[in-house]
């Protein structure tokens, strides 16, 4: 029987210094994106978490909050291939993954690859397209490969889907299938800027011609190096138990003494949520130059990892109880080690 290696050894001091040195590019990326994106520190930081933890990110907010601009700016700050798909009701799966084209002169089919073959894929207004098109992304998001005809093609690495959507109560939107929602590591709720930020946005953009220019500050090799360091970040056994307790409480709230939530939950978190929460917490620790995870790291990113995986009941909808309300209550109730 082969023993699996577990990362239960506390980090050495030199590892702490190595992580602090390697994480220097994170501040550079924040500064560079800050030249274009006013405020929205939370949004920028969570995009970097997704990049570090190799997890796809879903951004939800009303039109005009710089969701698309933030993703485009991130792509420009990286030396990586970037593609954008504008999702519309008449989009077809072949428009996303590609298709086989018959050549009469050669008498054979040739493969035309779709825009999914990129390092960063911006799926803009993903919930404007029907479920069959949304589902075309599933294989690529999970397996990092795409099947066209009878041939399978690996996607370039790193590969990240950064999707934007408008709130579901807006006209002309389709709800994302649960299976696809679960493939997103993070779901971010993008809010309006405050008064000072709005004034800065006005001063920077109230021109007929606005050109947003940024310099590349990070490449794929640096990201891969950082991901290897993140794998080695120390997650204490007590914190692993805490992660599992939080996720189990979404399935059976009585386990944490919050049995009143049971009526509001139709389905709880899957094991993928536990893994995603651990990886995202490690990424947050890395961004702060630490070689170990703290309970606050888990709490900081917990809502973004869990909010889209809890399926609320009709009773919750009737009483205006959201998945955010449920998760906040669970974090308040589960004992912190």
Image (tube, rainbow, N blue to C red):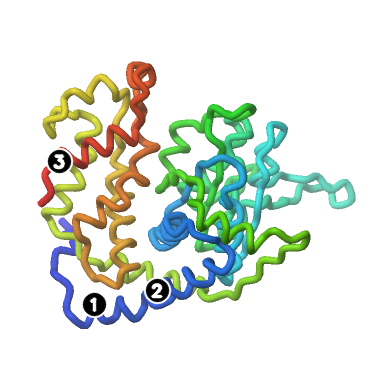
Quadrant location of residue 15? bottom left
- State the SS at label 3: loop
State how far apart marks 2 and 3 are (Cα): 34 Å
> Is residue 246 visible from the viewing direction of this image?
yes
Residue at the spot 23% in from the left edge and 25% down from the top edge? 261
For residue 218, above or below residue 260: below
Residue at the spot 56% in from the left edge and 54% down from the top edge? 198
Give the left or right position of residue 159, taking residue 270 as reference.
Answer: right
- Tell which circle, 2 or 3, labels the residue nearer the N-terminal end: 2
Give the left or right position of residue 273, taking residue 177 as reference.
Answer: left
Q: Position of residue 213 (x, y in %)?
A: 65, 70
> Is residue 5 visible from the viewing direction of this image?
no
Q: Position of residue 52 (x, y in %)?
A: 40, 63
Judge the density around disc 1: few (<14), some (14-19), many (≥20) Cα neighbours within 10 Å.
some
State how far apart marks 3 and 1 are (Cα): 29 Å
Q: Which residue is mark 1?
A: 16
Give the left or right position of residue 181, taking residue 148 as reference.
Answer: left
Disc 1 vs disc 2: which is toward the camera? 1
Q: Residue furthest toward the right?
A: 105
Q: Position of residue 256 (x, y in %)?
A: 13, 34
Q: Which residue is mark 3?
A: 334
Q: Position of residue 133 (x, y in %)?
A: 62, 35
Q: Nearer the viewer, residue 176 or 337?
A: 337
For residue 225, the mark is 2
* Tags 1 and 2 touching, CB below 8 Å: no
Judge the density around disc 3: few (<14), some (14-19), many (≥20) Cα neighbours within 10 Å.
some
State how far apart marks 1 and 2 are (Cα): 15 Å
């Amino acid at each position: 029987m082969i023993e699996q290696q577990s990362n239960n050894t506390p980090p050495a001091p030199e590892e702490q210094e190595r992580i602090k040195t390697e994480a220097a590019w994170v501040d550079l990326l924040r500064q560079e994106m800050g030249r274009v994106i006013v405020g929205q520190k939370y949004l920028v930081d969570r995009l970097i978490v997704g990049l570090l933890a190799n997890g796809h990110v879903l951004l939800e907010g009303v039109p005009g909050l710089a969701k698309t601009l933030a993703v485009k700016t991130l792509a420009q700050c990286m030396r990586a291939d970037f593609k954008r798909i504008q999702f519309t009701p008449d989009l077809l799966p072949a428009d996303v993954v590609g298709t086989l084209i018959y050549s009469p002169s050669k008498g054979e089919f040739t493969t035309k690859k779709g825009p999914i073959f990129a390092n960063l894929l911006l799926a803009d207004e993903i919930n404007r397209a029907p479920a069959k098109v949304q589902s075309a992304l599933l294989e690529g998001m999970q397996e990092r490969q795409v099947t066209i005809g009878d041939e399978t093609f690996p996607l370039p690495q790193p590969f990240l889907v950064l999707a934007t959507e408008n709130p579901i109560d807006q006209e002309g939107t389709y709800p994302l299938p649960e299976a696809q929602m679960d493939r997103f590591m993070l779901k971010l709720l993008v809010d309006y800027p405050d008064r000072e930020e709005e004034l800065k946005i006005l001063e920077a953009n109230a021109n007929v011609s606005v050109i947003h220019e940024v310099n590349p500050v990070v490449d794929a090799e640096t990201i891969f190096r950082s991901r290897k360091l993140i794998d080695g970040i120390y997650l204490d056994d007590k914190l692993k138990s805490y992660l599992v307790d939080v996720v189990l409480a979404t399935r059976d709230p009585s386990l944490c003494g919050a049995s009143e939530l049971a009526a509001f939950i139709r389905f709880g978190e899957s094991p993928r949520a536990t893994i995603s929460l651990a990886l995202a917490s490690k990424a947050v620790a890395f961004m702060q130059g630490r070689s170990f995870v703290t309970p606050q790291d888990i709490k900081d990113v917990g809502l973004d990892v869990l909010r889209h995986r809890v399926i609320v009941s009709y009773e919750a909808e009737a009483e205006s109880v959201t998945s955010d309300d449920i998760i906040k209550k669970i974090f308040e109730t589960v004992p912190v080690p």
